[in-house]
Amino acid sequence: MTRWLRGEARSNSPGRILILGGGLMGLAIAHQLARRDQRVTVLSRRRSEAAGFVAAGMLAPHAEGLENALLHLGQLSLSRIASWVAQIEADSGLPCGLRSSGIVVPFHSADERDAYATAAFGDRLDREQLLQEVPGLDSQWKAGLLFVQDGQIDNRRQLMRALESACVDRGAQFQEGVEVLELFTADGRLSGVRTRNSEGSEATLGCERAVLCSGAWSGQLLPQLPVFPVKGQMLSLQSPRGALRRVIFGPGIYLVPREDGLVVVGATSERNAGFSEGLTPQGQTTLKQGIATLLPEAESWPPMERWWGFRPCTPDEGPLLGNSPIPGLLLACGHHRNGVLMAGATSELIADLACGTEPKQDLAALLSSFRWDRFQSR
Ligand code: GLY
């Protein structure tokens, strides 16, 4: 059981910042902190469960139809993506697979298209224009929106690896197979964590600053946080090279074509699955049927891989950012469907807060919208 304890923890590495979670958010924050010459240690329970390896990597605030503060955060993140990726690529020497492929959202009618939350940000397409963008699109789709500003990144095969390498290159330390069991406080502030490693040994690490970015598991360490898993099942297809140029984002199904012709297909959205692992016949059938409803010719493209993961969701589907109930512990979790998009802006914001630097005004202005306690009546 995980608990939040009051007590003493030895400060065995004064000044070091602990990153509680080795997924995309943890890596991105560790990287930004290491670039600012902070000493950081990333504690990762199980690398393979990180949502960063599971997501399709769409950079899609407009295609996803985000609204209000979430849209604004998504747009700020999108505007920072190129420079963020350039930092990672420079530090790691590895490509991240950023592609400005644009994203097409198809609709059954022009009315449906015009009512879409982000319609004002897209190019309106009729059926003929839609077919020019996505040859072979099923005949049920009569209208569309093209968001040329949205894109994608190859999170699963490239970004995560590049970030790990960039972190190490910048001096971040890693402990893989280490679970954080408890948080300690002293005089009302964070004072350390208790951990268990993969050999079963427990240890106490003292720290005055940490970032909680444990994805869908964040609420297990700090039960006040309303973070819960939304399971997603996915698969990939190998298309003929160049068969699909744009990302297609349909209702409940999307196809994301990588540079080498691999097409990532997502995703189920299972709110009642909890942390149940594995593929299910129903989930895989949903994806198969979804492919047919979007692009019938893709039904003949061979499947390459199938996988699943857990989105970290909150009641309003927005992240928890900034201060936590424990002074010294910052939050960067609950990004639901938009973690890849928002990792760049989140890491900049959290690194500023951890270092005591004033965040840029555009990001700082959003902090109140993403407080952890916004769901409680005040
Ligand atoms: N970002 C798409 C998804 O979570 O399925």
Image (cartoon, helix red, strand yellow):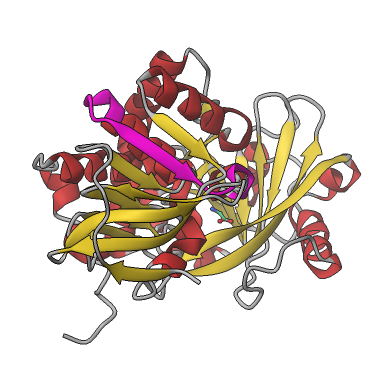
Residue 225 relative to residue 50: left or right: left
Residue 253 part of the magenta segment: no
In the image, the segment drawn in magenta is 34-49
Who's the residue at 58% across and 27% down the image?
A: 158
Above/below status of 114 relative to 130 = below
Residue 373 image position (x, y, % from top left): 25, 74
Quarter of the view holding residue 83: top left
Above/below status of 333 relative to 26 = below
Q: Quadrant of the C terminus?
A: bottom left
The foreground one among 246 and 360 is: 360
Who's the residue at 16% across and 46% down the image?
A: 362
Quarter of the view holding residue 25: top left
Residue 44 relative to residue 237: left or right: left
Quarter of the view holding residue 14: top left
Report whether residue 252 is seen: no
Residue 12 image position (x, y, % from top left): 28, 40
Residue 36 part of the magenta segment: yes
How many dots with numbers?
Answer: 0
Above/below status of 10 relative to 257 = below
Residue 13 image position (x, y, % from top left): 26, 37
The foreground one among 304 and 202 is: 202
Who's the residue at 37% across and 36% down the image?
A: 41
Residue 336 relative to residue 183: left or right: right
Report whether residue 348 is seen: yes
Ligand 1: quadrant of the figure? bottom right
Residue 359 relative to residue 375: left or right: left
Who's the residue at 39% across and 63% down the image?
A: 182
Residue 33 image position (x, y, % from top left): 27, 33
